[in-house]
Amino acid sequence: MKFLFAAVPQWYPVSPYLAGGLLAGQLKAHGFSADTYDFNVEFFNDILTKDYALECLSKARSFNAADVVCEAEYSDDINEKRIKTAQLRQKIIDDYFKFDNGKCDSVIEELEYSVRVLKDKELFYDPEKLFRAKDVINSALDIASLPFAPSRIMLDNFIANGIMTYDFKDVDYQCKHDDMNMFLPYFEKKLGTLDLSSYDYIGLSITDLSQLVPGLTLARLLKKYTNAKIGIGGNYIFKVEGDMKKIPEIFSEYCDYLSIGDGETSVVELAEYISGKRDIADVHSLVYRDENGTVCTNERAPLLNLEKVAFPDFDTYDFSKYFSPETVIPVQLGKGCYWGKCSFCDFYTGQQKFDIKSVMRAVDEVEYLAKKYGAKHFTFVDEAVPPKIYNEIAKEIIKRGIEIYYYSFARLEKGFTPEVLENLYASGARFFMWGYEAESERIMKLINKGIDLSYRKKILADARDAGLWNLCTFLLCYPTETAEELQSTIDVIYDHELVNTCTPSNFALKKNAILKDNASSVGITDFAENGELHISYKYHALTQTMEEVKKKRNSFEKKYLEDTADRLWAHTFTESDFLLMYLAKYGRDYVKNYRLKYKRK
Ligand code: SF4
């Protein structure tokens, strides 16, 4: 009885994904055998080569949209989308060669060195080399995207073809046709090099929209070409569970099981079922098709006893493959969000109600992982940890003399006093990702953030004085937000004494957000499916359209990126691990005051 947990693209390939390690550790503690494999990091290593880039350039040069014609086997709708895609691809390719002026040659020349820069301890810590290398890598990924445009792969995102919707029929077409899916030919070739015959079960985790098409593409191939049972889990699957269950092909072509919510209990029960020791109906949180073809949904797993969950096991990850010079380990101190009432939020959806490991148990885990993997850098992946508990954890880390650096999300709560922030810094915290959201009191009331707004700036100043870096997340264009209110948030973002990194996002109406049931209260007059496998709705609000929101956010971001182009990580979504490494090595003031001579793209 052997399980494999596979991570799928696209995810920033800096550190292993927690879910695989968590479930492998849990199974091993119960006497089963389990491995992990990171298809995401393999994918980036395999495509970021000179040969792959040359192959993509050659494919792009020989592309001719006129070769794509209507085929009788497809519906009119799909044929129309195929032709539109081909026309758009032709334009993107033509523009690329028109404006490239031979730059692609230097990108290809520098590519393999640039990959080395991200992985090499000396080269990485030279900001000039690092920021240039990231640009070269992203330019190489632009080349890799050309034959599949308008889809676009980046280190920090995968933008699927916008001509296709997130309705299953469109997703299904992409999963089966390599004219619209760069992952299909890649996985077909990769699977030919792997021996997966010893696995009885292969589980994939899909946690983000960027992983939906790649994850389902891989699931389908694994179901077709291996004898293993295929399971799909992850936060994203929880969010679209209802729609997925209605699609018969999900169970006939893509997987055998959907795993809903936290998997620590159900994975052990599933292993017991596959080894004949349990009935399938007794496997919690499982969705499957029975022998009559009926889709069955088992009961959700009871609350986990977090003290009894095994430590994660990252033994079968190859750390040398990650695009990072340091090993960064993800740790989850608890489950869920202890507030859980912000109107727009669906981050904690899929996790059980808030619970946190005891201080001793949490620090034991960190200490164990630090020793076992020789790691000093950690991400605490929690949505939020109450300041009082964080303080106790920090004090225990200090008491045991564990030398680590870490970061995590946090709420701007009064409990983050100067003393607590100093303890956190002394225990290795280097930055927190604070949910600032918006400056306007009115908007914050609508968001229902549940924090005392009069303390926010003081906490940021105290964090700064304790030596911490402040990364703040902002929510722009909440429905009814006025131009003045938006500007007041932008003014805070530009206060570099308090906000070192800004991570902006624009408002989206999520299917699982509290606001969905109360959308008219903020002038959302109607909303509808944005594709059955999408986690947000299309909406129309009295004060703004979705297009206007996108425009405002893009215009802010463009200007902010120009204004801060010579700063290190004044803006980031996904490079938190890099930021941690720099803060750990050089300290906050060096990172804050450094100005790049290299002109970023
Ligand atoms: S935005 Fe953060 S604090 Fe608010 S409910 Fe979501 S996870 Fe919790």
Image (cartoon, rainbow, N blue to C red):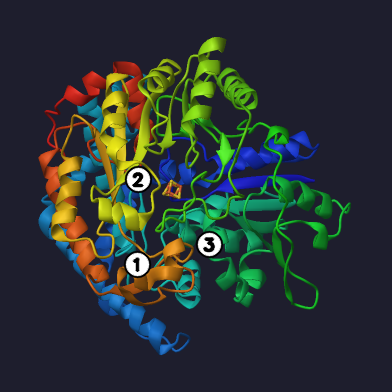
Q: CA distance from mark 2 to mark 1?
A: 17 Å
Amino acid found under the numbered disc labelled 3 = Lys
| Residue 38 in view (yes/no) | yes
Amino acid found under the numbered disc labelled 1 = Asn
Residue 34 position by quadrant: top right
Residue 219 position by quadrant: bottom right
Q: Where residue 8 sits in the image (x, y, percent)? A: 51, 50
Residue position marked by numbered label 1 in the rendering: 161
Q: Where residue 570 sits in the image (x, y, percent)? A: 22, 36
Residue 411 position by quadrant: top left
Q: Residue at horizontal 57%, vertical 24%? A: 366
Amino acid found under the numbered disc labelled 2 = Leu
Q: Is residue 98 above or below residue 332?
A: below
Residue position marked by numbered label 3 in the rendering: 239
Q: Secondary structure at mark 1?
A: loop
Q: Residue at horizontal 48%, vertical 14%? A: 403
Would residue 394 appear left or right of 194 to someone viewing this image?
left
Q: Are marks 2 and 3 in contact (CB under 8 Å)?
A: no
Q: Earlier in the sequence, mark 2 or mark 3?
A: 2
Residue position marked by numbered label 2 in the rendering: 155
Looking at this view, is 5 or 137 the one in front?
5
